[in-house]
Image (cartoon, rainbow, N blue to C red):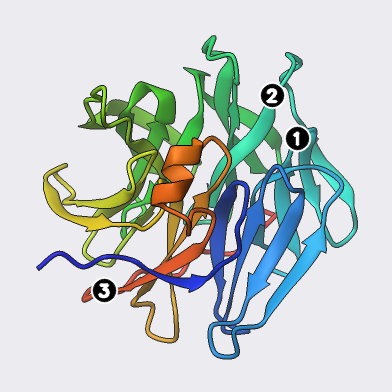
């Protein structure tokens, strides 16, 4: 049986991204990148709160002390104090931070976007020693997610239709042994490519296929296990949440869709959800002292 995602909030985000489940509050937060706003959604009441930001927030994470760290266009900031923790080291026009996550020790990982696809984007790690470049030569850094034991890091370069897996050393925050995990083949009628991702308790990788109107679930060996349709042309990133961590939330985008695609998928830009048999796992908070 194929289980589709269903709309839970018609947010009409231009580019909804980076959903984060806030277990302490029972809420989901996400960013609408080009609209420069953070959105909080309460599944119980349906209440939606919006906060404007000074720059585009590509991704964010809760901090150990209850604040928020956000990767924006010009750098990575503590949103509570408005203090810049690290500048964006890339100086070419259009560069901004994009997808990110925290590692098992609480370091913050975030990558960038090269809108001209010249291979100038990169993946970075932020810890107490500052900002360190981990991977370069990218078009769009995306799809960051860890295996349940924290020893494997998955990372996508969306325009190249590929997801790679790396061995990850949580003690040092270093990556090694990069290898191809998933490669999708585009066609004239299907340009679905791997965007944001999440990993469940069985170690399976869920990836949103941007411009593909679906989410794929892969085994730790890269085998396609299931396909879940989405009533939006461009799903962007899944995130496990809910009291039992068995609701898979999914953001989506309206920007980049043609009038024909929006007519076919009028809920594009909405927030969707799917009940899963396998729960997800909570992510560590950002710890600036690591």
Identify the residue at image location x=77%, y=36%.
Answer: 75
Q: Nearer the viewer, residue 108 or 214?
A: 214
Q: Nearer the viewer, residue 253 or 114?
A: 253
Identify the residue at image location x=34%, y=48%.
Answer: 213
3 or 2: tag closer to the N-terminus: 2
In which quadrant of the rendered view does residue 278 lie?
Answer: bottom left
Mark 3 touching mark 2, by CB under 8 A?
A: no
Q: Residue pushed farthest top?
A: 118
> Where is mark 3, residue-wise?
276
- Left or right? Give the position of 128 relative to 138: right
Sort mark 1 into few (<14), some (14-19) or many (20+) by Cα contacts within 10 Å: many
Structural distance between the alpha carbons of marks 3 and 1: 34 Å
3 or 1: tag closer to the N-terminus: 1
Would you place residue 1 above or below residue 255 in this image? below
Q: Nearer the viewer, residue 68 or 272?
A: 272
Sort mark 3 into few (<14), some (14-19) or many (20+) by Cα contacts within 10 Å: some
Which element is circle 2 on? loop
Q: Measuring from the top left, give residue 268's x and y in whole percent.
A: 49, 53
Which element is circle 1 on? loop
Q: Measuring from the top left, give residue 135's x and y in whole percent.
A: 49, 24
> Where is mark 2, residue-wise?
95
Structural distance between the alpha carbons of marks 2 and 1: 7 Å
Mark 2 touching mark 1, by CB under 8 A?
A: yes
Q: Nearer the viewer, residue 247 or 170?
A: 247
Sort mark 2 into few (<14), some (14-19) or many (20+) by Cα contacts within 10 Å: some
Would you place residue 66 above or below residue 284 in this image? below
In which quadrant of the rendered view does residue 111 lie?
Answer: top right
> Where is mark 1, residue-wise?
73
């Amino acid at each position: 049986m194929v289980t589709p995602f269903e709309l839970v909030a018609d947010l009409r985000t231009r580019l909804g991204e980076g959903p984060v489940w806030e277990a302490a509050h029972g809420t989901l937060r996400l960013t609408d990148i080009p609209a420069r706003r953070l959105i909080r959604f309460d599944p119980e009441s349906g209440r939606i709160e919006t906060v404007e930001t000074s720059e585009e927030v590509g991704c964010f994470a809760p901090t150990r002390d209850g604040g928020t760290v956000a990767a924006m266009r010009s750098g990575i900031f503590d949103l509570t104090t408005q203090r810049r923790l690290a500048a964006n080291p890339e100086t070419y026009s259009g560069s901004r931070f994009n997808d990110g996550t925290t590692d098992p020790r609480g370091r913050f990982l975030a990558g960038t976007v090269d809108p001209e696809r010249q291979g100038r984007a990169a993946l970075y790690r932020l810890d107490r020693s500052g900002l360190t470049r981990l991977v370069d030569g990218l078009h769009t850094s995306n799809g960051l997610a860890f295996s349940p034991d924290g020893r494997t890091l998955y990372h996508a370069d969306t325009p190249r239709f590929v997801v790679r897996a790396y061995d990850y050393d949580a003690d040092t925050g270093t990556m090694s042994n990069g290898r191809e995990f998933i490669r999708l083949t585009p066609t004239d009628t299907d340009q679905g490519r791997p965007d944001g991702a999440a990993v469940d308790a069985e170690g399976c990788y869920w990836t949103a296929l941007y411009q593909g109107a679906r989410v794929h679930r892969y085994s730790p060996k890269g085998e396609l296990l299931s396909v879940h349709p989405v009533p939006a042309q461009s799903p962007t990133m899944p995130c496990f949440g809910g009291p039992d961590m068995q609701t898979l939330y999914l953001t989506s985008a309206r920007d980049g869709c043609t009038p024909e695609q929006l007519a076919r998928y009028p809920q594009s830009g909405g927030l969707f959800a799917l009940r899963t048999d396998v729960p997800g796992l909570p992510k560590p908070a950002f710890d600036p002292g690591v």
